[in-house]
Image (cartoon, grey):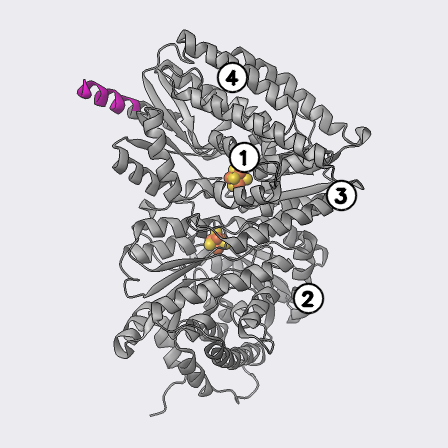
Amino acid sequence: MIMDPWRPFLEVMRDPLQWARSWKHMTGGKVIGHLLPDVPEEMIHAAGALPLALEGAAVSVSQAQASLPAYTCSHAMGLMEMGLTGQLDFLDGLVIPYVCDTTRNLYHTWSHRFPETRHEFLRLPKRLRHPGARVYLRNELERFGRYLGNITGCFPTAERLSSSLDLYRKSRSRLEEAYSMHRKNPSVWTWERVHMLMASAMKTPREEHLSWMQELPWEGDKDEKSQRPVPVYVRGKIWDPPEITKMLDELGLVVVGDETVCGYRSIASHYQEGDPLDSIVNRLISLPLYPGYHDEPRGVVENFLDRVKQSGARGVIFLNPKFCEAAGFDLPDLQRGLEKEEIPSLVLETSTRGVSLAQIQVRLEAFGEMIGEDLL
Amino acid sequence: MNPISSLRDLKQINIDYYTAAHTARQNGKFIAYVNAFTPVELLYAMDFIPIYPENHAVILGARRLSEEVAPAAEKLGYSMDLCSYARCDLGSILTGKSPTFGLPKPDLLLVSNSQCSTLTKWFEVLSRMYGAPMVLIDVPHSGNGEKDPQAELYVRGQLEELQGILEHITGRKLEGDRLRESIRLSRQASELWTRILLCGSQRPSPITVFDQFIAMAPIVAQRGTQVAVQFYQRLLEELEERVIRGVGALSNERFRLFWDNLPIWPELRRLSEFLDQRGAALVTSLYTWAWATLSVGEEDPFQDWAEQYLYTANLHLQRRIQTYVEYARQYELDGFLYHSNRSCKMVSQDIPELRRAVAEKTGIPGVILEADHNDPRLYSIESIESQIQSFLEMLDSRKRKAG
Ligand code: SF4
Ligand code: SF4
């Protein structure tokens, strides 16, 4: 019997926490969870642990509202829920990055609720393009390395980091290929599948993930079956609710560029040669900035428009997390910029709580029809 | 209620401040929009008038204009989930409605993110709107307040760079004497403000938090000037005299309460009367204390500012718990009113844990009031009042039981 090459990824994504728990049980390895974005997975790998990206999306909340107010984004609320319901008790460490006031408060609330866990706050600077931020970030990563080493007993030395970077380089360029396969052959390399590849890469041992990827149908023919695809660009944090990925496929919307933290942002940008820690710093600085960072204000809009135009997208979908100030303040100027360029956009305020999938479907459908009109 | 007469001076102080801002250019001055944790002493010494868009939003909220202006920002796409200060201020720019005739255009937007991350994004919008340069003083959040020498270097570097930017905009060099003078005045104002807040620990308290909210405008916007020093000297004298004569802000002080978070500006008068009628005095708060700790020394102000933004302004749960436990003792509190302010996530998201921890450690109960500091569409004042009423009844029965 020929094994379905997509199956290992599906198995991880069916229940990533359970998968990691079993992995730990079988291998005796250490697992360090981290909240997205921008926790350097390579460093966790170099410290000998499995980096497990945690997304609060798609977690149904029953207990967390006793610890965090209802006006908290689902990414943060979901992490708290997972903690309170014991789903994260197998973790050897937990890293919460400084992204916004919400993750800052989340870290302290977590520390208060779970004083016994080995959690750390990654103090990411916000003015990333400032030369001082580069120095600060490098030092912060060194501090982060010590935290990791103290948990695993194996410090991410330059040598270990170099070999992790080699692996991540290979894995990321493979994922970039997968990304472009989605454009070429969207009925086989659906967005649901490509997204699954990227997301599962952040939840499984990278070596294994890379070897699973070798088995995928890279040589398949150019897609003949699908109708003419409608290229779209997506800006947002996470795919929340996750069903959106499938909806895009069904509607013939092809993602030609995205800025989500478990999408292109997790695979973009190659490392430079030289000191491995500097390479990680450079990679973080050169990524399209997540809204939680600060950049020259006009550049924020202009650079975004450039990225959209370069992608060839006919429309932009914003997946704006509900209660997210960072994304919320950027939105109107980005939309106005798109209007000037005559690029239509659709805003979906996303959250697992209280959104209707049927409504999202209807809006996506209407949007797809509108931007795809003259393609038919 | 026994009104404090020196608070009447504020009207003229405000008029003078906004007039000076509107006529800045004619007088060779410059305008910088700022937030709480920015070096205003340096700005004053460099002929800048610091303007707080947050304060402007307060005026809109307190005059109950939020509902007239905020929808204009929402129509542009700013979600109602965003801080209502920002929505009101942006809406005021769009509609032209403002009791201060708007704010003068900025020469610079200066913000530090130790207060919150929202301001960075809000100022980015303003910077694009006005085409004005923006400087973020990025203050890494130092976890639990432990020393972070690398962060000190990073923050200090940005502050030193700021001096050059100000010199470039004004075409003038910083004069050491002027900086020392504004630092001296700022420290004096800060010390006076601290003593004013401490008056609240007297029984009966000669001042309520409502008075403090009204009185805080100069410590926020005019720290580093003679105006602030003179105003707080007069206010302190009046309060000290009240203490000697045993005059309280309320005629009949029965409960001593803490107010957490920002005020509900549109309801300031209504809530103040509601509490007054029930003998409930708000004797201290987190918000007004923030400005008591902002003074720096003359010897190395850049280092002092850096440390202050990193460590003193570093608000977080553990620190809040410790502080509130201390206030409970110092102010002999009977209860805590926690304003869960959906606009200000920074100061609100840890309230559920905070309330639990403070109640456990002190035995003093607290009630969480769901509201918003500037947008009446997002809360019901009637249900807030009924919650406070039940809370006071509970405090009353505790008092009775305790004999
Ligand atoms: S940046 Fe937005 S989505 Fe991300 S944690 Fe903060 S509030 Fe939530
Ligand atoms: S979020 Fe809070 S601290 Fe920030 S501007 Fe709004 S009210 Fe002020």
Instruction: Relative to B25, say whether B402 is above or below.
Output: above
Q: Which residues are magenta?
A: B392-403
Q: CA distance from mark 3 to mark 2?
A: 39 Å
Q: Could you say where residue A344 lies in the image, as x and y percent from the top left?
A: 64, 59
Q: Is mark 2 within 8 Å of ligand 1?
A: no
Name the residue rendered at 35%, 64% in the picture.
A93
The three-letter code of the residue at mark 2 reads Lys
Name the front one of labels 2 and 1: 1
Give me the residue at 49% from left, 64% from top.
A141
Disc 4 or 3, which lies upstream in sequence? Answer: 3
Q: Is residue A45 above or below residue B150?
A: below
* Separation of residues labelled 2 and 4 (CA atoms): 61 Å
Contact between labelled residues 3 and 4, with CB atoms less than 8 Å apart: no
Q: Foreground: A185 or B133?
A: B133
Q: Residues within 10 Å of mark 3 (few under 14, many from 20)?
A: few
Q: Position of residue B378 (x, y in %)?
A: 46, 35
Q: Residues within 10 Å of mark 4 (few under 14, many from 20)?
A: many
Magenta: main secondary structure equals helix
Q: What residue is drawn where x is 37% and y is 72%?
A: A13
What residue does disc 3 label?
B167
Q: Are marks 2 and 1 on the same chain?
A: no
> In the rendered structure, which amino acid carries the disc numbered 4?
Leu
Chain under disc 4? B
Numbered disc 3: secondary structure? helix
Q: Which residue is mark 4?
A: B236
Nearer to me, B270 or B325:
B325
Mark 4 Cβ inside 8 Å of ligand 2:
no
Q: Which residue is mark 1?
A: B294
Q: Nearer the viewer, residue B223 or B208?
A: B223
